[in-house]
């Protein structure tokens, strides 16, 4: 209830509807009533796990964005390529439950399509830190010798990603990539996929395995 000791037009003190009147050192003032804050309910264990899983997978996928934008462009209809990657990897490659999460590299998806991948692909690492890949160039229906080979290299400890889009053409049968000094002396995971020059079709992601120093 508001008080008006000096009359209805004089200073008041108290609450009048949405405003509060008072005085400070004899000076009357008016301020609006603050909004009542709703107390935030504590998150349930299931909500915490869901948010933790979401953050883990998004953070893991983020360094691969350049390659995902090529490999999943054709599936990103009404959504981003990273949205597609999240869904594909959540259901296909994510292992464990929060907070003990990891990825099954053999099932990781950076690309998805009907274009045939590399046949009989082999990978090795030289002492100088070069990743070399070889594959069969025998013709496969639906392919072209100009199809582009995309290489992705992942280093777990530092969460580093390297590689190259269009590193080689399918018809070459071999290619190599020099690792940076940051990956020197560390195990790395190697992935490849193939894309048409016009990007109309891509292959599924192929995991070529782990290369030790």
Image: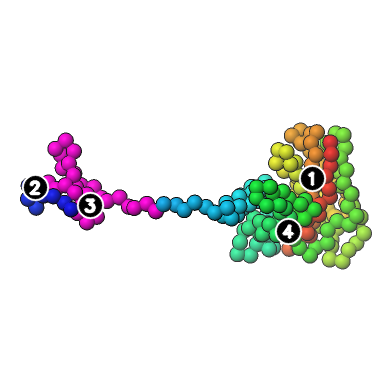
Look at the image and tell me in which quarter the C terminus lies. Answer: top right
Which of discs 4 and 1 lies nearer the camera? The answer is: 4
Please tell me the numbered disc located at residue 128. Answer: none
Residue identified by numbered label 2: 5
Tell me: 116 left or right of 88: right
Which numbered disc flags the more N-terminal residue, 4 or 1? Answer: 4
Real-space CA distance between mark 2 and mark 4, rounded to the nearest whole angstrom: 74 Å
Which residue is under mark 3?
A: 19
Q: CA distance from mark 1 to mark 3?
A: 64 Å
Whether residue 82 sits left or right of residue 164 in the image: it is: left
| Residue at image coords 74%, 41% | 156
Circle on res. 92: 4
> Where are the magenta residues, as a range?
11-38
x, y (%) of residue 174? 88, 48
Residue 120, by quadrant, is bottom right
Residue occupying image coordinates x 24% and y 55%: 18
- SS category of the residue bearing label 1: strand
Answer with mark 1 or mark 3, whichever residue precedes in sequence: 3
- Disc 4 to disc 3, C-alpha distance: 57 Å
Where is residue 46 shown, x and y percent of the image?
59, 55
Quadrant of residue 117 within the rendered picture: bottom right
Residue wearing tag 1 = 189
Q: Are marks 1 and 3 in contact (CB under 8 Å)?
A: no
Circle 2 or circle 3, nearest the eye: 2
- Of label 4 and label 3, which has the lower sequence position? 3
Mark 2 or 3, nearer chain start: 2
Magenta-colored stretch includes residue 57: no
Front-most of 171 and 35?
35
Q: Residue drawn 18% across and 38% down?
A: 24
Q: Residues within 10 Å of mark 4 (few under 14, many from 20)?
A: some
Residue drawn at x 86%, y 56% as measured from the top left: 118
Q: Residues within 10 Å of mark 3 (few under 14, many from 20)?
A: few
């Amino acid at each position: 209830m508001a008080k008006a000791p000096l009359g209805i037009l004089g200073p008041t003190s108290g609450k009048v509807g949405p405003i509060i009147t008072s005085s400070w050192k004899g000076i009357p003032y008016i301020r609006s009533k603050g909004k009542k804050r709703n107390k935030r309910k504590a998150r349930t264990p299931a909500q915490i796990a869901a948010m933790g899983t979401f953050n883990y997978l998004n953070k893991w996928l983020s360094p691969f964005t350049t390659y995902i934008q090529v490999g999943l462009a054709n599936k990103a209809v009404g959504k981003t390529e990273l949205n597609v990657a999240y869904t594909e990897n959540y259901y296909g490659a994510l292992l464990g439950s929060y907070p003990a999460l990891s990825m099954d590299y053999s099932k990781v998806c950076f690309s998805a399509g009907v274009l045939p991948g590399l046949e009989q692909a082999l990978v090795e690492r030289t002492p100088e830190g070069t990743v070399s890949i070889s594959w069969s160039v025998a013709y496969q229906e639906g392919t072209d010798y100009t199809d582009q080979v995309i290489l992705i290299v992942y280093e777990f400890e530092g969460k580093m990603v390297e590689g190259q889009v269009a590193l080689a053409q399918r018809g070459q049968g071999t290619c190599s990539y020099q690792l940076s000094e940051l990956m020197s002396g560390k195990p790395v995971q190697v992935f490849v996929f193939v894309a048409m020059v016009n990007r109309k079709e891509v292959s599924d992601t192929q995991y070529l395995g782990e290369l030790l120093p």
